[in-house]
Amino acid sequence: MPKMKTKSSAKKRFRFSANGKIRMKPSGMRHGMRKRSQSMKRKARKIGNIAKADEQIIKPMMPYQRKS
């Protein structure tokens, strides 16, 4: 059986934590910072976890990264 391919878009945007949860950086921090509120910019600095429903979409895209 041939190897399964990892989606390039997923490997650029998501990382797996040691417990198998998917981590991501919030969007909206590339340009146009003047129009963003200060609180939005502060919140977008943090790396967050993906919701459980979204994890079920992302995990099949990254078959060899799965921890759980």
Image (spheres, helix red, strand yellow):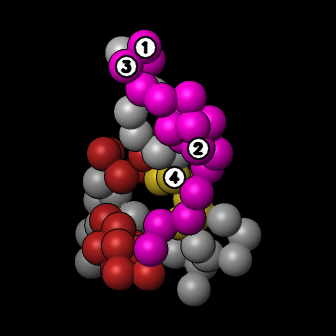
* Residue behind mark 1: 34
Quote the CA–CA distance across marks 3 and 4. Answer: 23 Å
The quarter holding residue 15 reads bottom right
Mark earlier in primary sequence (2, 3): 3
Question: What segment is highlighted magenta in the picture?
Answer: 33-51
The tag on residue 24 is 4
Mark 2, mark 3: which one is toward the viewer? 3
Looking at the rendered structure, the secondary structure element under dot 3 is helix
* Residue behind mark 3: 35
> What residue sits 57% from the left and 86% below the top?
68
Work out whether 34 lies above or below 20. above
> What residue sits 61% from the left and 49% below the top?
47
Quote the CA–CA distance across marks 4 and 1. Answer: 23 Å
Q: Nearer the viewer, residue 52 or 33?
A: 33
Residue 31 visible, this orientation: no
Looking at the rendered structure, the secondary structure element under dot 1 is helix
Please state the horizontal and vertical placement of residue 29, each as a whole percent of the image.
45, 27
Q: Residues within 10 Å of mark 1 (few under 14, many from 20)?
A: few
CB within 8 Å, label 4 to label 2: no
Quote the CA–CA distance across marks 3 and 1. Answer: 4 Å
CB within 8 Å, label 2 to label 3: no
Looking at the rendered structure, the secondary structure element under dot 2 is helix
> What residue sits 72% from the left and 69% below the top?
18
